[in-house]
Image: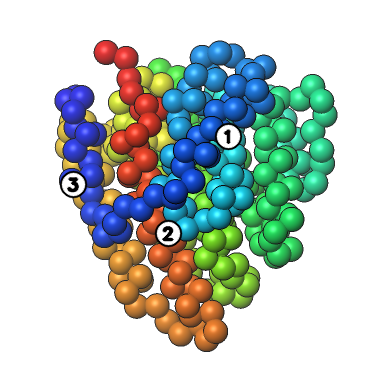
Amino acid sequence: MNKTITKNLKSILLNPFPPRESSHKELLREKSDKWIDEQYSSLPQPFIKMMRRLDGASWAAHSWPDASLSLLTSFTRALLWGIAQDDYYAPFKKEELSKVTHRTMEIARGAIPEHGENPILHQFSIFMREFEAIATKEWVERYVYDISQYLEGIEIDSSISYRKDINYPSIKEYIPIRRKNVAMATVNDKIELVTGILPNYIVVHPFVQQARILAGDLFAWSNDLISLEKEMQDDEGLNLVLVIQNERSCSIEDAFDEAVQMYNSRMEEFMVLYNDIPDFGVYTPVVKKFLEGQGLWISGYLNWFEETNRYQTAN
């Protein structure tokens, strides 16, 4: 496969949202580098280096440009945790991973990690308590549920990936699994902390649910396109391009092109919603801001990947 293919993504993926960036990026980077060096220090050094290359501060600054510094600080910690949770624990065996999931959910519901527990659990506890202090009870309950879906997605991915004889799912099977393990539901929740918390009766409305689903597919599929070479090396099974290639028995280039077409089609669907928001009464402007926040996240992710070294692969 041509190694320059992912470098052209921004020119071939539809992206109606202009790039923006928080002025707090450099301060966030100082904070996150300090967390990684000090609070993740008991993890293997190659893993710590990976976390630094990730540049979660840039990701947060691009994706939530309107957030306050305090929110961006919590969001950056959460982004680092999400990558750490997936990259560190996903290769675990089923029984070990189930224990991690159980313990993480205990902490999500209020348990405090013990002194000697993995720093990934400690980081999770910190931002969970920070969110609890500023959000509504309804929001927290929804966020805890969405975290459980993310962890379930990691477990499903772990049962498929990280082996040479990958049993790829069909495209139809892949989509709902990927919606879980990409954790976009938790991102949608965090967008509300910036744009305004929506009551549950608005969140469950078919329009908002569809917006959440479409934004999740856009995030997942852009990630799959960006990370293709890395995930081929890592024996990752939940990548849209590889799933298409396996199902269609086609070349990797043709599978890549089909994935791009699927992404652009989803973006067109999202823009139909974006441009035709129904009447939600007093919450209509909040829903509009929420979709704008989703657009900023989608655009911000594409802009962030140009700055990060996370997806560089060995020659």
Which three-letter amino acid code belongs to the residue tagged 2? Gln
| Residue under the point 34% across and 64% down | 270
Which mark's residue is nearer the viewer, 1 or 2?
Answer: 1
| Residue name at image x 48 percent, y 22 percent | 50
> Split into 4 quadrants, where in the image is the N terminus?
top left
Residue assigned mark 1: 31
Residue 301 vertical position relative to residue 30 in the rendered view, above or below: below
Residue 94 seen anywhere in this rendered image of the structure: no
User: Residue 192: x percent and y percent?
Assistant: 55, 62
Judge by depth and name the residue closer to the eye, 188 or 239: 188
Indicate the amino acid at tag 1: Lys
Give the image's coloring scheme: rainbow
Q: Is residue 286 left or right of residue 226?
A: right
Which kind of residue does numbered mark 3 sit on? Answer: Ile
* Image point (27%, 13%), residue name: 315
CA distance for labels 3 and 1: 34 Å
Mark 2 — residue?
A: 294
Point out the tag, 3 or 1, that comes first from the N-terminus.
3
Mark 1 element type = helix
